[in-house]
Amino acid sequence: METYLKRAASWLQGSFDTATKEAVKNLMEFNPKELEESFYQNLTFGTGGLRGIMGVGTNRMNQYTVGMATQGLVNYLKSCFAHLPRIKVAISYDCRNRSAEFARITAEVFAANGFKVYLFDALRPTPELSFAVRHLGCQSGVMITASHNPKEYNGYKAYWDDGAQVLAPHDENIIKEVEKITDPSQVRFDGASENIEMIGKEMDEIYLQSILSLINLSPQAIKEADIKIVYTPLHGTGVYLVPDILKRLGFTSICHVPEQDVNDGDFPTLVSPNPEEPAALKMAMERAEAVHADLVMATDPDADRLGVAVRDSHGQLQLLNGNQLATILTYYLLRRWKELGKLTGKEYIVKTIVTTDLLKQMADAYEVPCYNVLTGFKYIAEVQRNLEGKMTFIGGGEESYGFNVGSFVRDKDAVVSCALVAEAAAWAAEQGKCLYDLLLDIYVEFGLFREHLLSITKKGKEGLEQIEVMMKRFRSTPPQTLCGSPVVLIHDYQSSETIDLISDLRYKIELPKSDVLQYITQDNTIVSIRPSGTEPKIKFYFGLRAKLDCTEEYRKVSVSLDGEFKKLEKELVNG
């Protein structure tokens, strides 16, 4: 209490503006709980960078935390790139409330410190920012976005010179620099406008041309497939580029959800702008039924995640989860690359440790290495960086609806993913199939891998403490069995150790430390537990597998596995 009260008191002095000081006073007098939430800690870089609720305080997104974070990043960049005559950065932002303001503040702080700043002239997707960093030879980049979080949030994604989000030790070192800045007077807010260059349509064109170079299907095949698509940007940045790239590919039947084409940080048609949640696609699916569309696609506000619905063999729309989407796209890429003679033995794919193992199963069948990395697309990008010039990245994804192909962007990319999903649908149509048929064929060939995610929200300081207690309990008293099958392996990514419970041997995990636990049973059930890096949640990832003899058995086997998920939830969470 003494610490956060001291922090709050410091905001009543110094260079803070009058409105901010009044807001802090109001919290002190009338809302002590919110005062604690706003000041009990500083925002820190997690798997998604700086992210928090907008408002006054050290634990909130506001002009001061954005400015101080930027000055800390400036100071660190100066120490890392002192040998360069001038440091360059690129900045973009999404549709959220105050995003444009935070982007302008960020640009002015960089400019005031003598950096060359490329600032997008209007909101643009996160993947285009990653692309611009690499294309313009920048040393860093910043994307102002809270991705798929609720409307109260905003965020600050910091990128390194390879176009990927910052990794250790850079993220930790940036925070150390930020912590040295205790008052806005230490921030150079008044930017030199001559150091800021606006960019826009010319970068769009280069980015879109790069995506077109990744396509593996002929314009004629796309035309003949005549796939009818409903697309929604969920009020976000995708509206500017996704319809454009689909039209350039040759898809002519693209229907919109007009209410959701409007950029609006209040997300008036949504409870949450998260394509992982079925409710976010409700209006798009209603539109698809009205126009008899084959395919529904929805991108989140910064267009790096993609939600998809496809029609099954009975003509019913079915939502795909992130694992199913990654499965279809990975299979299509592997199959198509083989058909085109592009597999030479020097290609690879990447997945995260909580993403379906079906991706590895398929890669093994095509004799393509599959790298397994920690949760967060920056770790996929790290593999790309390490293998650049040695091997070719086919594609990679994570269960949280993120995927990417090619080397132009070093983050998940819903713009290229939309193009790839539509392309795969046209390829399947060539064979008289839809994407749902393709998914079931994959399950028959490789086995039915079925996954389930349970997220438990624990808000605020108390919630964070509860999550820490839960993780400690799972570490100290791991389950001996799960659904009747003995636990045989425990992967603890925080201690970097695998425990083989059969042989009682221990092995070192050659990945960075991360607060993740993974239990594997004798029948190959996989349970992963981790606190979210971007939301106040603890997440449980359940993975089961079963043999599928024919597509007609899919629903029966799926129902059986879903029953096992309920048992797992009861054993681990509900006790």
Image (cartoon, helix red, strand yellow):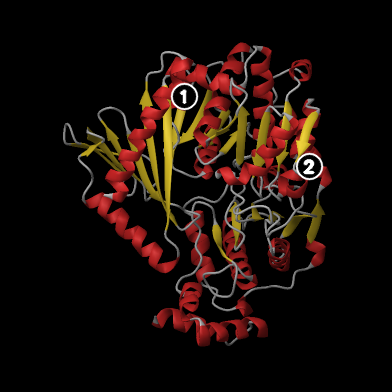
Give the SS element for disc 2: helix
Q: Is residue 40 left or right of residue 294?
A: left
Q: Total of numbered circles in the picture? A: 2
Which residue is tagged 1? 369
Residue type at the position of mark 1: Pro
Q: What is the x, y in percent for residue 96? A: 68, 59
Eyeballing the image, is 442 above or below 8? Answer: above
Residue 97, image x and y in percent? Answer: 69, 63
- The reply to whether residue 166 is in sight is yes
| 185 to 440, vertically: above or below | below
Instruction: Classify residue 184 as left or right of residue 176.
Output: right
Question: Viewed as shown, does residue 510 lie left or right of 70?
Answer: left
Residue located beneath label 2 in the image: 204
* Residue lying at 41% horizontally and 20% vertically, measured from the top left: 447
Up the image or down, 167 lies above or below 78; here it is: above
Q: How far from the left and from the top, in percent, is residue 376?
A: 50, 45
Point out residue 99 in the picture as x, y percentages from the top left corner: 69, 61
Q: Nearer the viewer, residue 31 or 558?
A: 558
